[in-house]
Image (spheres, rainbow, N blue to C red):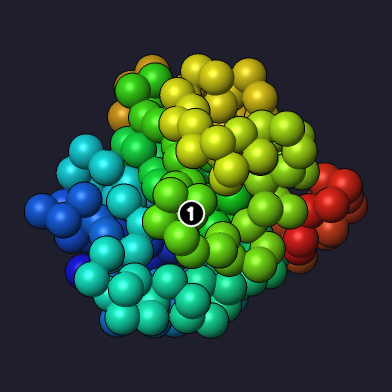
Amino acid sequence: MIRVADDGALRLITLDRPDKANALTSGMLEALCEAVEGAAEARALVLTGAGKVFSAGADLEAARAGLATSPLWERLSGAVAGFEGLSIAALNGTVAGGAMGMVLACDLRIAPASAKMFYPVMKLGFLPQPSDPARLAALAGPARAKMILMGGVKVGAEEAMRSGLIDRLAEGDVLAEARALAADTLAATPEHARAIKALIPALPGAVR
């Protein structure tokens, strides 16, 4: 349910459970962690989903059984944030709940205008993963972070772009646009790519 494809120096990771809106199980989270942690030789990392939804977050049955508080979520977002190349969330559609963590940890986020972003932890009675609120507030500001986490607001892609949660609205194939954004990094040496990324400071409050 997690597909990994290496195309030269680009690693493409696809959430592939479209019949369940790519809701994540413990096994899928483990596989995601291993796929990102195993991308050390890649210069670009692209995360996307199969079907019309990037991910609905945790599989609800698994969440009730303890997945909502699993350390795997933080391990995954930490691995994405620690990737030394260029990481891109190529959102094929809506992203919700704990799946926001890996998206927020990416360097860039692109999505179609139809996508939405929401994190219904208040309604479901769970806490967000520890680093997610800081990354969310660093990108979109504290007020919008509270709107999403405490007010349960579903943010459309256009509003998300205005607030900084999304960096580009995809006009066509989201994967093609992700590859285009990664092209210069893929053409560079690993040392050059790492050096430039290291020169760019993290957003205030963000967790790297």
* Residue lying at 57% horizontally and 77% vertically, measured from the top left: 75
Could you say where residue 79 lies in the image, as x and y percent from the top left?
Answer: 60, 72
Q: Is residue 57 above or below residue 114?
A: below
Judge the density around disc 1: few (<14), some (14-19), many (≥20) Cα neighbours within 10 Å.
many
| Residue beneath disc 1 | 121
Q: Is residue 136 above or below residue 4?
A: above
The image quadrant where one finds the C terminus is bottom right
Which is nearer the eye, 139 or 90? Answer: 139
Residue found at x 56% / y 61%: 128
Amino acid tagged 1: Val
SS at mark 1 in the image: helix
- State the image coordinates of residue 160 (x, y, percent, origin top left): 56, 26
Residue found 45% across the figure and 24% down from its top: 156
Q: Is residue 135 left or right of residue 165?
A: right
- Name the residue rendered at 63%, 19% in the picture: 162
Considering depth in this image, is 109 or 186 the residue closer to the camera?
109
